[in-house]
Image (spheres, coloured by chain):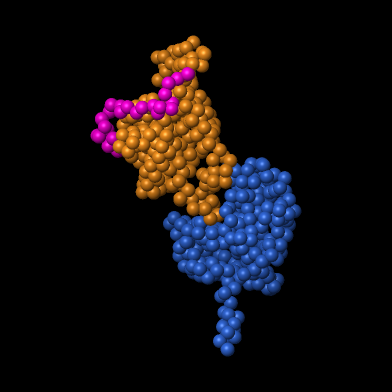
Chain colours: A blue, B orange
Amino acid sequence: MPELKMAEAAAAKPAEAKVLAVQDLQAWYGESHILHGINFHVNAGEVVTLLGRNGAGKTTTLKSVMGIIGKRSGSIRFENQEIIRASSDRIARMGVAFCPEERGIFASLDVRENLLLPPTVRPGGLSLDQIFDLFPNLKERLASQGTKLSGGEQQMLAIARILRTGARFLMLDEPTEGLAPVIIQQIGHTIARLKSEGFTILLVEQNFRFASTVADRYYIVEHGKVIDGFANSELSANMDKLHTYLGV
Amino acid sequence: MQALYAQLLVGLINGSFYALLSLGLAVIFGMLNIINFAHGALYMMGAFCAYFLLNIAGIGYWWALIIAPIVVGIFGMILERTMLQWLSGLDHVYGLLLTFGIALIIQGVFQNYFGSSGLPYQIPDALRGGMNLGFMFLPIYRGWVVVFSLVICLATWFLIEKTQLGAYLRAATENPTLVRAFGINVPRMITLTYGLGVGLAALAGVLSAPINQVRPLMGADLIIVVFAVVVIGGMGSIMGSIITGFALGVIEGLTKYFYPEASNTVVFVLMVLVLLVKPTGLTGRAA
């Protein structure tokens, strides 16, 4: 019964379900050593949140996975392929999509061009109709210059454009930063809906109240290392620790 | 009045070359952040390419219009791959010095073999002669240069401002890292952009060959004026460099008619005025 053994082995070793596995990730900006050995993983269909203070290395972690930090070492495996040496365009074409903290809306492109900019990397991305269903505001503003949108609309545009590409693994860097509560709520609904549709999401957040509404698991990043991790169900048990870590 | 129209036509012709060259410089500057001082030498190479095609291979003007920009464009892409790409992220002055050096080497090599005098290049049969417009006599070839340059300029504008490829280009000009993180091979796009800009210069060289003769220093004389045009128009804008190119050609032509003594300096006087009032140029965005 070799098949059964195989199935058991697969069940015992959940590596196959890991979309992203990061081991001993180190990264540098020029001469400064920012990440000192980051370890974490994200399973298929999960929303995982990196929490931590400003400057802890959360954004650098996302950028390292995306391949846009010049010097990095360790191991980053995406869908069981090593990508630590890959160029960022290749990583994107493998199905990793990134929504940067500063949103990265292009001023010289109108909203439609911004939305259509990222090329399709896999079949099965959201259609424009599905995107307008998620973000009705964008449909009204297609001809506007990208940076003429409000902060909330820009954030929606930044998320919307990576949903078109067919990438199933999304990295969102502080999607709620500086936004009004009603917009934060809308983004929360969007993330929940994406999760229910099977997207895997790696989130960086300062706003852990928001994170707690969408996340399955948390990792705490401090001084360029992951120092703790727990599931959402253990959140209340870890509240005291969390307050210490985040200084809130 | 005849003389005025004649000078206006000369102005439009010069304007065509200014526009094609400054357009290429603007595209290259936007994407590579390099002030391409080799542009004049590459323009000259376009003219020489047409000359060689005709005199060695017997290939005429019409094919030269297609082949020369491709050949010189490929030469440009090799320059970009082997040298210019290593300058990304450095100060403008490095790119300026490197391309200036490249220009001197290219021009020196051509001067070594062809001296400084001009080689003739015949107007193609179909564009010989002229027509009487009633108010002036229009040499057909000159009319062709103006119209064809305008078409090429507008096509380039359309490519950059209205197509998906152009959207990649504009986006990569703003934030190449993010565009690359969307899965677009930005380094390859940069190489192709340099090839496009250089190809435009070579095309201008072919157009100019029957009018100005083919000379190793034909680009060196022109490029100084073109840089003044670029400073006046501003580096950032595609349409701005087209309009400024044609407009300054016309202004130069008018000066030749009304006050010939100033015709060689009027562009530079305008440059100084613009720099004093609006240092980013008339249509330029702040860097």
Q: Quadrant of residue B33?
A: top left
Judging depth in this view, the residue of A179 and A47 nearest the camera is A47
What residue is at 58 percent from the left and 41 percent from the top? Answer: B162
Q: Quadrant of the C terminus of chain A?
A: bottom right
- Confirm whether the magenta stretch covers residue B174: no
Q: Position of residue B131 (x, y in %)?
A: 47, 18
Residue extending furthest toward the right? A182
Q: Position of residue B40 (x, y in %)?
A: 38, 33
Residue extending furthest toward the bottom? A1
What residue is at 39 percent from the left and 33 percent from the top? Answer: B61
Judging depth in this view, the residue of B135 and B81 nearest the camera is B135
Taking the image as shown, residue B139 lies to the left or right of residue B55, namely right
Q: Quadrant of the N terminus of chain A?
A: bottom right
Q: Position of residue B110 (x, y in %)?
A: 28, 35
Residue extending furthest toward the top? B1
Span shown in magenta: B105-131
- Confirm whether the magenta stretch covers residue B119: yes
Q: Is residue B87 visible?
A: no
What residue is at 61 percent from the left and 48 percent from the top? Answer: A114
Q: Quadrant of residue A192?
A: bottom right
Q: Quadrant of residue B141?
A: top left
Judging depth in this view, the residue of B215 and B148 nearest the camera is B148
Q: How many marks are shown on the rendered structure?
A: 0
What residue is at 40 percent from the left and 40 percent from the top? Answer: B67
Vertical placement of residue A179 versus B163, above or below: below
Q: Is residue A198 visible?
A: yes
